[in-house]
Image (cartoon, rainbow, N blue to C red):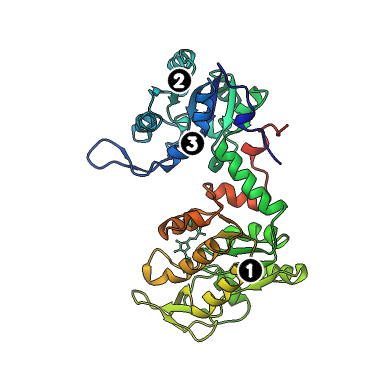
Amino acid sequence: MKKLSVGDLNLGGRRVFVRVDYNVPLSRQGGAATITDDRRITASLPTLTTILERGGSVIAASHLGRPKGKRAPEYSLAPVARRLSQLLSRPVSFADDCVGAQAQEKAGALTPGGVLLLENLRFHPEEEKDDEAFARTLAGLADLYVNDAFGSAHRAHASVHAIASHFQQPAAGLLMDAEVTALSRLLDAPARPFVVVVGGAKVSDKLDLLEHLIERCNALIVGGGMAYTFLSALGHDIGNSIVEKEREMEVRDLMTLCAVKGVSLILPEDHLEAKPGERGRPTAGPSVSQGYAALDIGPKSIKAFTTEIAKAKSVLWNGPMGRFEDAAFAAGTEAVAQAIASCGGFTVVGGGDSAAAVKRFGLESGFTHISTGGGASLEFLSGKTLPGVAVLADAP
Ligand code: ADP
Ligand code: MG
């Protein structure tokens, strides 16, 4: 499902509406808002520079936070315009509303190489309602449309969905293209063995993902909080570990599906268990002591998981192996991340917390692709059609 890319467009002299994801973290200490992490802005630069270097101009648009359809100064994108200007080393004009006379004037005044950033799309309730008239007004600002906001592609909002029908060739930006290409490769043509590693807090968030991937992978490794619903379904004592009892039936079905499809299912053989405020101690086997919660996988599990991962030619990882935010329970997640980074195959990490773990351990260079879209990558990997991807034109 290769999509038309910004690089395929005839950009010279054109105004390009670029849907970006500038939903950056802001700190508001002492009045003025400062951007505490500008990676989402730097991530958009390749797409913007492609357009600018080929003689186009850019009208960038994004949401920021949840202003709930009203103007709210604390969610203004004005600080982003200043940072974008520094990063691009060229002036960036700013329209204090994404529609209306000022936006039209500033868009109309753009010359080749010019950049305009529009104010927060979500100041208008029409954005999240996928409103047709609002989409048409946004579209009226530009000649071409590019979506580079993969993390917003699972929502049918006006700037990612309704807007596209107003352009002949709605195209993917380079970030969007990289996401769709990497994730599609795992689903459609993974190098084998294909090992899926899942963890994190809740199995209920990831049932569809697991079902879709069991159809495609060779081994499924389950760690982290979600493993305790599996172990509980198998009759093990899990102490006070997090569990979703009401999901045990569905988890049993998944285990049956693994057997039917010939997928090796690998569950933790041991854990680090602790009482609140204590450091962990290793368990002897898969059962957890009464009054204790399992907060990381144990040394035997680390050995088993990393041995399987070392044989992989492709790996998808989603969800940490324990409560890794606490250094006492980070060893399992770090060992698994390290094993994936050094397996030498095609390696993808999806999920906000797992991506944060990869960064924290300094292992980014070991991953082929670090997905930026939490919810969007989960839905894509679950086999769902993302509205913002579906509306883009297919590659020639
Ligand atoms: P991702 O964002 O990568 O998809 P999730 O959001 O599903 O990951 O899960 C991350 C959270 O799961 C983390 O906050 C982590 O502390 C928690 N977690 C993982 N294992 C355990 C565990 N054994 N007990 C409690 N919490 C856990
Ligand atoms: Mg998360």
> Disc 3 to disc 2, how far (Cα)?
16 Å
Can residue 238 be seen here? The reply is: yes
Circle 1: residue type: Lys
Residue that badge 2 annotates: 114
Residue that badge 3 annotates: 44
Quarter of the figure with residue 7: top right
Q: Is residue 97 left or right of residue 47?
A: left
- Camera-nearest residue between 2 and 143: 2
- Camera-nearest residue between 302 and 268: 302
The residue under the point 69% across, 53% down is: 187
Mark toward the start of the polypeptide (1 vs 3):
3
The residue under the point 37% across, 67% down is: 326
**Element on which disc 3 rests:** helix
Can residue 95 be seen here? The reply is: no
> Disc 1 to disc 3, how far (Cα)?
35 Å
Q: Which mark is residue 228?
A: none
Circle 2: residue type: Gly
Q: Which mark is residue 311?
A: 1
**Element on which disc 2 rests:** loop
Circle 3: residue type: Ser
Disc 2 + disc 1, Cβ < 8 Å = no
- Camera-nearest residue between 297 and 359: 359
Name the spot of residue 181 as percent of width and height, x first. 64, 45
Residue furthest to the bottom in view is 284
Report the mark closest to the observer, 1 or 3: 1
